[in-house]
Amino acid sequence: MDKNITFSGETFAALGITALLAVVIPVLAIIIYKKKVKDAWLPAVFIGAGTFFLFALILESLLHVVMLPIIGDSVVWYVIYGSLAAGVFEETGRFVAYKTLMKKHYTTKNSIMMGLGHGGFEAAFVIAANMITYIALGMLINSMGMDELLKLLGTAPDQVDAAVDQLSVASGFTFVNVGLTIFERILAMTVHVCFSVWVYKAVSQKGKLWLYPAAILMHAAVDVFAALYQKGVIGIPLMYIVFSASVVIIVALTVLMVKKLPDKPELTAQPDAKKEL
């Protein structure tokens, strides 16, 4: 395993720009949407962000601690479990949020705000945090070398190869990767907005509860190819092609849903949910 890794100035710049864009783009999207739809409920953004934090980063991660060692090296079970876990936890989080914190603010525009908060926080937390971490580790590698860094971090012997591989990939991060990473995040945010609408319709419309499990299954289906890529089964071009096509289909279905189903809540809404507070 080659440990002669260095981070170039281009790599540091690319990582930094990616981190910045991962924060700026979601914020701009929220500001633009709020400016365009003035009566959209801004707190829905923070509810969406909190939903991702609680259900994906905490609860789902706790289950991973138990399940991933059981799954081991099985690609099939990793793909099945990883895809379903993401769908179940994130869509259930939205469902719970609509039934509690959002129940007096049932409108499609507010579900979009919630989706922007959910997807925006994921981009800012996951992407930006990872980029900043790689910048810090890259600076340490350049100053002390990989061997000393691994000693400093107390990396277990059985994890050395994985750590070296991960940092080797990060050291090759270029401006091309900036574009690909941000493009993927924009697609992911779009999906979160769409599924936020799906779950909202499931909660607020009579006879449409089936949209909740549909959102879980569609979410899982979208994540299948990402899981296959993570396991090295498919390459990044195929992953991006399938993901892009999936987003187009999901957006089209969401637009049709919004046009067909009334925005006014039915059956499950509270009496005072008809009017924005």
Image (tube, rainbow, N blue to C red):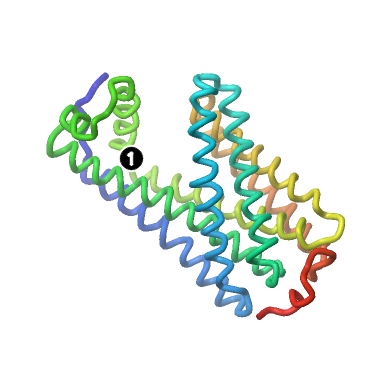
Amino acid type at circle 1 is: Phe
User: Residue 96 occupies which quadrant of the picture?
Assistant: bottom right
Residue at x 65% of width, y 66% of height:
102
Which quadrant is the N terminus positioned in?
A: top left
Residue at x 41% of width, y 59% of height:
23
Circle 1 SS class: loop
Residue 230 screen position, x and y as percent: 49, 30
Residue 51 screen position, x and y as percent: 56, 56
129 vs 2, left or right, is right
Residue at x 32% of width, y 48% of height:
15
137 vs 50, left or right, is left
Residue 71 screen position, x and y as percent: 54, 23
247 vs 56, left or right, is right
Q: Is residue 276 above or below residue 22?
A: below
Residue 160 seen anywhere in this rendered image of the structure: yes
User: Residue 142 occupies which quadrant of the picture?
Assistant: top left
Residue 245 seen anywhere in this rendered image of the structure: no
User: Residue 254 occupies which quadrant of the picture?
Assistant: bottom right
Which quadrant is the C terminus positioned in?
A: bottom right
Q: Residues within 10 Å of mark 1 (few under 14, many from 20)?
A: many
Residue 267 screen position, x and y as percent: 84, 64
Outermost residue toward the right?
207
Q: Which residue is mark 1?
A: 173
Residue at x 39% of width, y 43% of height:
177
Outermost residue toward the left?
143
Q: Is residue 92 above or below residue 270?
A: above
